[in-house]
Structures are given as C-alpha cells and as structure tokens.
Image (spheres, grey):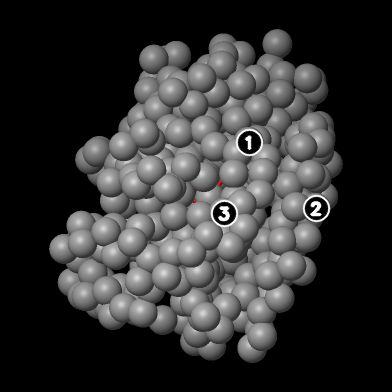
Amino acid sequence: MTSAQRVLVVGCGIGGATLAYALRRNDVDVHCIDIKPSTPPTGAGICLLHNAVRALGTIGLADACLESGLPFQVFKQYDAAGKLLASNPAPPGCGMRRPELARILEGAAASAGAVMEKGITLRDLVDRGSHVEVTFSDGRQASYDLVVAADGAYSKVRERVFGAEHGVRFAGQSAWRFNAPRPAEVDGFCLYRSADGRRTVGALPTSKETCYLFFLENSAEHLHMPDDQLHVLLHERLADFSAPVIRDSLAHLTDACQASFRPFDITLVPAPWHRGRVVLIGDAAHSPTPQMTSGGGMAIEDAIVLAQSLQQHPTVPEALAAHGARRYERVKTVFEASLQLCLYEQEPVPNPQRSAALLLKTYQYLGQPM
Ligand SMILES: Cc1cc2nc3c(=O)[nH]c(=O)nc-3n(C[C@H](O)[C@H](O)[C@H](O)COP(=O)(O)OP(=O)(O)OC[C@H]3O[C@@H](n4cnc5c(N)ncnc54)[C@H](O)[C@@H]3O)c2cc1C
C-alpha cells in the first residue's frame, strides 16, 4: 500500500518521467504534465554515471538505456592539436542522446498507465492539508494526495510554494553543445585542453554512430547569445583547436539550430524539500553545475527514492521526511564537488591534478547506495 494514491507530477523531464514510471509500478494513479508542447524531444547528449545506471536498473530501465547509448569506461586527455596526453580508467558510464533517454522514460511511464499531458501547466495550487487542489492553465480543476515539482532549475512551483529566495544564481560558466557523427577516438570521456589549460572542449559518445561535443566558457556576467548565430560564434571560439576530432565535428555544424548555449544557473534548496503536500525533486530542488555529469542522475535517484518512500511509509508527511533524510547529504556532496570543479576551472592557473583527484573521490562516493 502506498501513502499517496493520486499524484500530480509537474514536469515530464528526466526526474518527472522516471517518477511517473516508478509510481505506476507501485500502482499509484499518476498525472504528469509539461508546459512544452508535444513535439519530439531535442537536445544534445548526456552521460549517465554508474550510480544513475544502477538506479535505472532498480526499475528495469537500465538495459534500454545501455542498448540505445554507448557504455564506456575510459577518460582521455588530449592537447588542442589532438595529441593524447593521458588515458585512465573511469567508472562505468553510458553516453546517450537526450531525446532517446526521454523516449525511454516517457514511453515506459505512458505504457505503464501514467497520464502524460503536454502543453499544459499549473495556474493555481492550494494545499488543504489532507489533499492539494490545483487549477490547470486550461481551467480544469483536480485534487491530488501529493504534488511533485519536477519542473527543472527555473521551477515555478518552487517559486510559488518556497518563495523567490531559492531561485538560481550564475556560477560563472556556460556550455556550448552540439551533436556530430562519432569518430572512433571518441570511445569514452575525452577532454581537449588549450595550451594555457584555461579552455576545454569535451567529447562524449552518445551511440555507436553519434557523439556530442561541449565547450565551456568562463564569464563574470550571465551571457546571452543570439540564437541565430550560435554556430558561427562556436566556430570562432574553437578556431585554434586543431584536433581532427574537433575540426571534423565542426564541419558538420552548419546551422544555428544544431548548437545550444546554456549558462550554468545553480541552486541548492536547503532541507526540507517539501512544504505540506508539495515536494521538489531533481533540478527544482538542486540544480548543479555539470562538471560531475550528475544532475540527471540525481534527478533519477530522487524519483526512485521518493517512490520507495511513499511505498514504505504510512503517511505522506512521513514519506516526504524520509525522502529528504535519505537524499539531502548525498545531493549536497555532489552539488558542492561539481561547483568546486567549476570554480577550479575559472582560476587563472588551472591545476588538472587537483581537479582529477576531486572528480575521482566524488565518483567513488557516488558508488555508495543512494
Ligand atoms: C551543459 C549541461 C550538461 C549536462 N550534462 C549532464 C550529464 O552528462 N549527466 C547528467 O546526469 N546530468 C547532466 N546535466 C544536468 C541535467 O541535464 C539536469 O540535472 C536534468 O535534466 C534535471 O532533470 P529534471 O527532470 O529535474 O529537470 P529537466 O530535465 O529540466 O525537466 C524539467 C521539465 O519541466 C518542464 N517544465 C518547466 N517549467 C514547467 C512548468 N511551469 N510547468 C510544467 N512543466 C514545466 C520542462 O519543460 C521540462 O520538461 C547537464 C546540464 C547541463 C546544463
């Protein structure tokens, strides 16, 4: 028996869709809404670390991800001309295309009976203590035992229920990303560093045929890039990287819509992550910088632990308290390590050994049970 029988999940992203499926496995009635219209999902790649794959394994979705993506266990470092400087074993991870991850998670939730509704959001929400009454953007009304905010870093539910003080702040770095055909060399996590060590291009396999590349840009201020010039601006920024992997990949970048630019806007909401019968999961509760490639993994773990807590505890307040107690320290450790790595990268003289040591230590920490 579960302590919540009717659950509204706001946001069908990585955390929301995982939760919708995990709850359906426990026979909970799930309504999952997303403000985005029902268009095919887009996006670059994502790395699911060992803990994320293990968490997906607990709900039977790891194999689909491993088959769609490309598992890897190597971390390679190159100079800007493509000369291999170091190749080290990495904890097992899986690179995959974000639209594929969305297809697997949303498809599993819908097939299991979750109601997945796109192009809709919340207009109003009132917590009555024993249930939550909501009004949707199309005027419909409904009531639920629990409302889960899985609406990402810029969460409107968080703002409404927790106040504006937990909003995001800029971490001093942004990422450019684009997809490309996969060269054989990109069989793991590859980093290409400029001669002064201050600029980094990364490449990650996302399937046997594809990979994605990212470039990290430091700036004191939050930057805005013109959407129709992204490809041109990225070509300019990478002009002095002569590594064949980067040059060949850039040759495929011919249109602005193939590239994306995203400032690292971060937040870590202090515990508890619930108010009454409304709880935050994933980026809505903790949006880290991506250096630990773990924001998605943390959202997946949050979703699975929340479904377990609702199953294990007789009341919603007890379940939400247990969920927060299991999640907060783990998420905080990963959030702080990610941010520290991001800050190291902004120092005038980077120290790659120090960064690698912190990365490795935090990878090992992630090996502990969620
Ligand atoms: C450059 C970069 C690289 C990254 N690389 C990795 C990586 O390799 N591995 C990893 O694990 N993580 C990575 N991350 C982090 C990862 O993308 C996020 O942590 C993850 O997407 C969070 O999942 P989520 O479900 O909480 O939020 P999201 O995936 O952002 O989903 C939120 C959903 O809510 C919907 N929504 C928003 N507002 C509303 C609203 N008002 N009403 C209804 N719906 C709404 C959105 O449309 C969206 O579908 C990276 C992040 C960045 C920026």
Disc 1 or 3, which lies upstream in sequence? 3
Q: CA distance from mark 1 to mark 3?
A: 14 Å
Q: CA distance from mark 3 to mark 2?
A: 18 Å
Residue at x 61%, y 81% (from the top left corner): 346
Relative placement, left or right, of 363 versus 143 is right
List the residue tagged with mark 2.
361
Q: Residue type at mark 1?
A: Pro
Residue 225 location in percent, x, y?
31, 78
Q: Residues within 10 Å of mark 2 (few under 14, many from 20)?
A: few
Residue at x 51%, y 55% (from the top left corner): 190
Q: Between label 1 and label 3, give the one nearer the viewer.
A: 3
Q: Residue type at mark 3?
A: Lys
Where's the C terminus, which quadrant? top right
Q: Secondary structure at mark 3?
A: strand
Disc 3 or 2, which lies upstream in sequence? 3
Task: Find out if the beta carbon at label 2 lies less than 8 Å from the nearest ligand 1 atom.
Answer: no
Q: Residues within 10 Å of mark 1 (few under 14, many from 20)?
A: some
Q: Is residue 307 visible?
A: yes
Question: Where is residue 13, by image quadrant?
Answer: top left
Q: Which mark is residue 68?
A: none
Q: Is residue 8 visible?
A: no
Q: Residue type at mark 2?
A: Lys
Q: Which mark is residue 92?
A: 1
